[in-house]
């Protein structure tokens, strides 16, 4: 799944809470960011089994190095790499002193459906228009698959409708006055108003849930469409075509319909912008002109003078993967909880690659799993114990659509109205301390105030997402908690580095995105700078400790995309 680049370090928060005796990791507040300067010598990871209760760079590095090693084979669900990863996490939870988190078990079995197109090289989308015909093969400019578990798809001469952004919202309906049942719908990526940068439509440049590709497929299915294709463009999507191409290669994972009743399409896919232009031209239509019209109030869907056909078969298997969950029971209100999450899964290995074949996923997201282990260690040693229960969930299938967290929330050991907050850790920065903290989803919930106070205490300032059009708030596991009404914290160390400023931070971010993200090159590096990580870990522990000892529940702010379950208001 796409996420924030290398500098996705989690926010720095208050080092001591509620005027109680601080636990060991929080006894001394982290050094203010502005005071840290020269890079230290490389960290020597802690020897196996010698972990301390205090949060430390050495302990974090040891856990990170282990999880990102070739031994774990890229941590792909359904492989031996999964079994080794989940066993390691369970052993660490048990050693730390947590209790099994799901009905007396460490493991929560997540059913998953694997759907893989057979002979993808032989699959083509055929378009017959009044002007010309066009043919698109999987990979270079088109991807296609089935979302409803169909083993055989034979879509023949389907009418084509351009439905703008594919949105049906209270004040906007791209499906107005047209029946798309049995038809093929083509839509744009992002929200209405993206193309002309209209600040008055939806949330202006900030992507909403209506702009997510998952929503567009679900809405087309609700409308009765036979197929939907999204037109990709890099600025609007927030990632290049290669991410779409790679993401739709091989088996596609989803929850079975019994676990996820949302409507599903039999045929779904993407076109590149170049392919869409060719397709529309075959129908005698101007894609660029219709694209512009989709951003204007009063837009109406347009039927194209063309028919689309595609035929393919898929192999469908139902199997399972595991969330690993442990918790510390609360001393006074054990039925209430804080939930820390980090996804353990990555992309496995590709034996067709030459050279390095393993997607080790060191940053994405061995850092996050190492982080929740460090924080769990601190909570387990805390005196007095937290008043609310504190859960630690290493979830699966994030890279396949946030499915492990979706299942965890649907089958939560704690009711949503009893969860004070979710703190999600996904891809921590390992390039040293920063002067600022970027809050993804700034303005959504009262958790903003926790971060603002904490950032100021450590000499930092906070800022909102620099790339709101990319919709990072909807692209990691916490969004499943948010959709259930639970305020979620997802923030990162900013781009203004103590050593080198914004220029160095942007260079590091670009390097990670270009050369490491979702590539075999996302490897453990013994020369990483963990100063920022340690501060962030202490911060995240402190935020959780404060929340765990409060009697109130943080709320969503007016105008937020989500709302609290009634019992927690």
Image: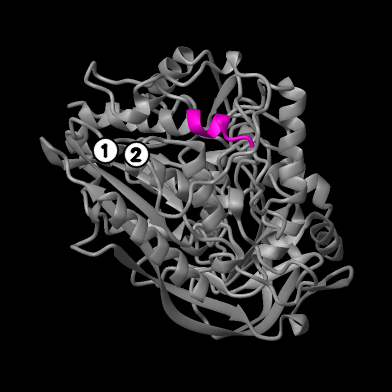
Residue at the location (45% across, 39% down)? Answer: 170
Which mark identifies residue 53?
A: 2
Give the magenta part as a residue range.
Answer: 529-535
Direction from residue 223 to residue 416 in the image, left or right: left
Identify the mark nearer the N-term, 2 or 1: 2
Q: Residue 389, image x and y in percent?
A: 21, 42
Please identify the quadrant where the C terminus is shown. Answer: top left
Name the residue tied to disc 1: 381
Q: Residue furthest right?
A: 132
Q: Is residue 475 visible?
A: no
Which quadrant would residue 213 be assigned to in this image?
A: bottom right
Q: State if disc 1 and disc 2 touch (CB < 8 Å).
A: yes
Q: Is residue 3 above or below residue 285?
A: above
Mark 2 is surrounded, within 10 Å at the Cα level, by few (under 14), some (14 to 19) or many (20 or more) other residues, namely some
Q: Residue 221, image x and y in percent?
A: 50, 64
Direction from residue 272 to residue 527 in the image, left or right: left
Which is more toward the observer, 111 or 298?
Answer: 111
Please identify the quadrant where the N terminus is shown. Answer: bottom right
Q: Is residue 505 visible?
A: yes
């Amino acid at each position: 799944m796409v996420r924030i680049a290398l500098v996705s370090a989690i926010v720095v928060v208050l080092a001591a809470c509620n005027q109680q005796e601080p636990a060991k990791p929080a006894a001394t507040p982290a050094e203010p960011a502005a005071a840290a300067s020269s890079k230290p010598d490389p960290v020597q990871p802690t020897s196996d089994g010698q972990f301390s209760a205090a949060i430390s760079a050495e302990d974090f590095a040891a856990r990170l190095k282990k999880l990102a090693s070739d031994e774990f084979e890229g941590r792909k669900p359904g492989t031996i790499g999964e079994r080794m990863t989940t066993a390691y996490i369970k052993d660490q939870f048990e050693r730390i002193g947590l209790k099994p988190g799901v009905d007396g078990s460490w493991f929560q079995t997540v059913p998953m459906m694997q759907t893989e197109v057979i002979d993808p090289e032989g699959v083509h989308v055929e378009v017959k228009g009044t002007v010309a015909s066009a043919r698109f093969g999987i990979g270079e400019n088109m991807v296609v698959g089935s979302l409803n578990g169909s083993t055989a798809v034979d879509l023949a001469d389907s009418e084509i409708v351009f439905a703008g952004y594919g949105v049906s919202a209270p004040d906007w309906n791209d499906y107005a006055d047209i029946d798309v049942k049995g038809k093929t719908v083509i839509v744009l990526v992002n929200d209405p108003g993206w193309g002309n940068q209209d600040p008055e439509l939806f949330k202006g440049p900030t992507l909403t849930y209506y702009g997510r590709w998952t929503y567009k497929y679900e809405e087309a299915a609700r409308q009765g469409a036979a197929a939907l294709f999204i037109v990709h463009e890099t600025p609007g999507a927030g990632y290049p075509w290669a991410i779409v191409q790679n993401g739709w290669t091989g088996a596609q994972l989803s929850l079975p319909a019994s676990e996820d009743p949302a409507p599903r399409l039999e045929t779904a896919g993407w076109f590149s912008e170049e392919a869409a232009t060719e397709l529309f031209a075959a129908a005698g239509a101007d894609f660029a002109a219709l694209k512009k019209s989709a951003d204007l109030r009063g837009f109406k869907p347009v039927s194209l003078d063309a028919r689309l056909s595609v035929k393919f078969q898929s192999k469908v298997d139902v199997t399972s993967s595991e969330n690993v969950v442990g918790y510390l029971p609360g001393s006074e209100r054990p039925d209430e909880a804080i939930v820390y999450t980090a996804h353990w899964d990555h992309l496995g290995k590709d034996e067709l690659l030459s050279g390095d074949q393993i997607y080790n996923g060191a940053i994405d997201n061995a850092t996050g799993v190492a982080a929740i282990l460090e924080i769990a260690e601190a909570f387990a040693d805390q005196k007095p114990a937290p008043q609310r229960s504190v859960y630690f969930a290493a979830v699966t299938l994030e890279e396949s659509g946030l499915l492990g967290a979706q299942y965890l929330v649907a089958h939560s050991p704690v009711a949503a109205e009893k969860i004070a907050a979710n703190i999600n850790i996904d891809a921590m920065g390992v390039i040293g301390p920063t002067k600022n903290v970027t809050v993804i989803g700034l303005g959504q919930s009262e958790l903003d105030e926790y971060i603002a106070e904490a950032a100021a205490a450590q000499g930092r300032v906070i800022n909102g997402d620099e790339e709101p059009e990319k919709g990072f708030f909807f692209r990691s596991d916490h969004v499943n908690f948010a959709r259930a009404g639970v305020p979620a914290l997802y923030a990162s160390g900013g781009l203004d580095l103590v050593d080198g400023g914004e220029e160095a931070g942007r260079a590091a971010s670009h390097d990670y995105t270009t050369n490491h993200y979702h590539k075999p090159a996302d490897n453990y590096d013994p020369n990483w700078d963990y100063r920022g990580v340690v501060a962030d870990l202490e911060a995240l522990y402190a935020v959780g400790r404060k929340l765990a000892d409060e009697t109130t529940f943080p709320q969503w702010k007016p105008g937020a995309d989500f709302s609290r379950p009634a019992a927690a208001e």
